[in-house]
Amino acid sequence: MNIITRLKAGEGSENDVVNIEKIARTMKYASFCGLGQTAPTALLSAIHHCPQELFARRGDQ
Amino acid sequence: MSKINLTIDNQKISVSENTTILEAAKKAHIIIPTLCHHPDQKVKANCRICLVETAPGKLVTACSTPVREGMEVKTKTKFVREIQKGVLELILANHNQDCLKCVRNGNCELQDLCEKFSISREDIDIVPAHDIAIDSIEMDLSNPSIVRDYSKCIKCNRCIEVCREVQDASILSGSFRSAQYTVQPAYGKKLSETLCTYCGQCSTVCPVGAIYEKSEIDDIWDALDNPELHVIAQIAPAVRVSIGEEFDYEPGTPVTGKLVSSLKRLGFDQVFDTDFTADLTIIEEGYELIDRIQNGKTLPMITSCSPGWINYMEGFFPEVIDHVSTCKSPQQMFGALSKTYYAEKMNIHPSKIFTVSIMPCTAKKFEARRDEMMTNGIPDVDAVLTTRELARLIKSAGLDFKNLPEEKFDEPFGITTGAAVIFGATGGVMEAALRTVYEVLTKETLDSLEFYDVRGMEGIKASKVMVGDLEVNVAVAHGLSNAKQLMQEIKEGQSPYHFIEVMSCIGGCIGGGGQPITNDPGIKEKRLSGVYFVDQSMEIRQSHKNPTITKIYDDFLGYPNSAKSHELLHTHYKRRK
């Protein structure tokens, strides 16, 4: 949650993105129920398709 | 049963139906990491560390997935390892990593996994320090037996299962959801506010240091260091066949002599055997049984040696209080005698005697602090160490346990019998009582001292024994959920028994909550055979033939169930709320 908050505020580091992706992947593949397996999808897609947007806000500052 | 063929890591293997991938891999000599899995328990599949790949990109938990024909399992691909490591890091992210100060340092399943996955400081630091705030409720130090350190809990739920399924106490359960999930008593109560029996089984299944006994090691050091105190020890029957495991002995090896010599070297003034008061218990309890049978008093009579059972009974089955023998447990009988008979004999004031008991049990700590267990305002037993604590004490004192010479117990409380040793095994108290009651009632000698019907690991064992013309129906239960069934019968007035033995823990004291922690599935059987081995090798194997017992009745107590023994060796029970 802390990492997401930082990314939202445009204060995320490259390391934050690496970490959040790792956590999301673990969650996707290791979860017991369908909810856990699916919930990280949006985040993973965002990282996969538009990583630059995650940093864009950072560049503004 | 038909065989299933599958491949695990390119190895072909054929196993029977309903085998899990985990079990099949074990047969192929492949170890899959586990954390929530325990050989004595059901499959939970909630820790997610045992993931394996059954198709590219498809992960399943090995512990819960049965094998299928033609299955191709991969247990160590890069993908599997990446996700397993991810799971481990997520567990670590909310685990208090003060390993150096942890009671389980060196015997922790989580620590072993970190080593296996080469978790380094860097991996843990992927989440910056300020993001790792251990989110947990306050430590529970509310009772004399069990400590709960919530900051170390990894939510594997093993303790919940043992508390609910094996011990029928259901004190621990899961509260809240997701990241807030906590294993704790309902409504966030402390253990002391619940009907917890303090059996400590939760502490023996905990893979980490989240549940452990409240240590009294420092009190022992202080007492040993105090020149004014006369410090004596009593060692329970089940400790001698289990403590060896902590020093790399084969499980079940009796190490009585080394145990005595290590306590002597630690500075104990006298080292005695709880077996002595186990013999005394048999006499007192045996005569109580004879009195109840002959005078038509409340039957069945139930044994009272197991404090976990007493706590359970007072909390869950107060209706059977009159059925429970009024005898104190051997630990407390010893304590009472140490502050009276022994004090008089040695001419030491009872307040200057510090009695330490070495027990396989966490509930014994609670028992020693009960109000009923005081004589003239002085506690009968001053401190209780579990088998695990004593092993730590011996190690921290730098004693080379394996190479110590063997020494004998001190007299007078060191002369004991085989009947007392088997107190440590389920069915042992029953067998010991039968060995004595038979001979006392019939005045005949038993041809064979072994009562095989009451031995073994079956949950409830029943037997009929002919004592002269009298048919005595007996039953033995170990594990509180088994005891529950027998208590239900008594409550309904349906119990066909005269005498029932109940031990709180599976296997009896050898499986106690203070015993060395291990995941070896055959451990209890090995300890049991150690107990019966010691019994076989004893010179005297019946309590009433113990010469010191005869002497203590002549010198001090008078006769079994006398007013004096009632004052010192018997107790009463009350409903727990």
Image (cartoon, coloured by chain):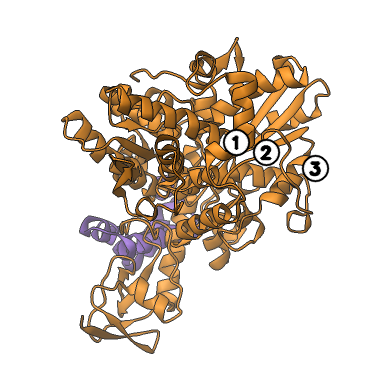
* Apparent side of residue B434 relative to residue B214 in the rendered image (left or right): left
The kind of residue tagged 1 is Phe
Residue occupying image coordinates x 29% and y 28%: B316
Residue occupying image coordinates x 32% and y 39%: B173
- Does the CB distance between marks 3 and 2 fall below 8 Å? no
Instruction: Name which of mark 3 and mark 2 comes first in the sequence.
Output: 3
Mark 3 or 2: in front is 2
Observer-nearest of B267 and B91: B267
Query: What is the crowding at mark 2: few (fewer than 14 residues within 10 Å), some, or many (at least 20)?
Result: many
Residue lying at the far right in this picture: please name it.
B227
Q: Identify residue for label 2.
A: B414
| Chain shown in purple | A
The kind of residue tagged 2 is Gly
Asked if B251 appears above or below B287 in the picture, the reply is below
Can you tell which mark lies on residue B276? 1
Q: Identify residue for label 3.
A: B265
The alpha-carbon separation of the residues under discs 3 and 1 comes to: 22 Å
Query: What is the crowding at mark 3: few (fewer than 14 residues within 10 Å), some, or many (at least 20)?
Result: some
Same subunit: marks 3 and 1: yes
Residue occupying image coordinates x 25% and y 34%: B487
| Chain shown in orange | B
* Apparent side of residue B143 relative to residue B320 in the rendered image (left or right): right
Residue lying at the far top in this picture: please name it.
B376
The kind of residue tagged 3 is Arg
Check disc 2 and report its element: helix, strand or loop.
loop
Q: Quadrant of the C terminus of chain B?
A: top left
Asked if B31 appears above or below B174 in the picture, the reply is below
x and y percent of residue B455 in the render? 39, 53
x and y percent of residue B509 in the render? 48, 44
